[in-house]
Amino acid sequence: MSGHGNESPEGRPAPHLPRGGQDLPTQPKRDWAPLSPRQPSAHETPGHDYGYGPPGVPRVPVDHSLPLTALVCNGIATLICCNVLCIGGIVTAALALGSAHTDPEESQNLAKWSWAILIASVALQVIALIFLVEQGFFENDDAPSGSV
């Protein structure tokens, strides 16, 4: 036996030590506990848009198409057609967009109301236009006749 301490009694190198007599590096002693996985706080619930969520729970994408198109159509009807009744539709569509992440069901309900306001206001505008045409509101009485 040699005096190096890295050989077995049979003369072979010890399996746990590298050749050349070097000692293996030791693991540092930890005086802290390993990190535990993050637990959601009391106000966070799985399935909402708080970070990644627990594994295995898919994130449901929020659909903004219905309230967004309602907002655009109500805005066009207000600006181009001068339909001031559509302002209520703009407000409800904006509220629907604002609540899309927190309450998707309420968002869809508000978007449907916005569409209903748009349809009702356009129908009232058409009825008012027909009534005014029948009453002769757009006729010009001061215009000269066609004969000279």
Image: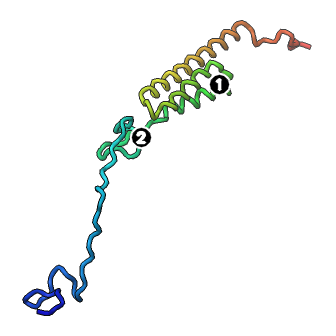
Residues packed near mark 2 inside 10 Å, few (<14), some (14 to 19) or many (20 plus) = some
Q: Is residue 130 above or below residue 98?
A: above
Q: Residue at x 62, y 12 (%)?
A: 127
Q: Which of these two is toward me, 11 or 37?
A: 11
Q: Quadrant of residue 86?
A: top right
Which quarter of the image is occupied by the N terminus?
Answer: bottom left
Color scheme of the displayed model = rainbow
Left of 109 or right of it: where is 125? Answer: right
Residue 68 lies, in percent from the top left, at 53, 33
| Pointer 2 residue | 49
Q: Which of these two is toward me, 62 or 25?
A: 25
**What is the C-alpha distance between the residues marked 1 and 2?**
34 Å
Q: Quadrant of residue 13?
A: bottom left
Residue sitting farthest toward the top: 135
Residue 112 lies, in percent from the top left, at 48, 24
Residue 106 lies, in percent from the top left, at 44, 26
Q: Residue at x 19, y 82 (%)?
A: 17
Give the total of numbered labels. 2
> Could you tell which of marks 1 and 2 lies nearer the N-terminus?
2
- What amino acid type is highlighted by mark number 1? Thr
Q: Quadrant of residue 3?
A: bottom left
Left of 52 or right of it: where is 10? Answer: left
* SS state under label 2: loop
Comparing marks 1 and 2, which lies closer to the viewer? 2
Q: Is residue 35 above or below residue 141?
A: below
Residue sitting farthest toward the left: 10
Q: Residue at x 17, y 86 (%)?
A: 6
* SS state under label 1: helix
- What amino acid type is highlighted by mark number 2? Asp
| Pointer 1 residue | 78
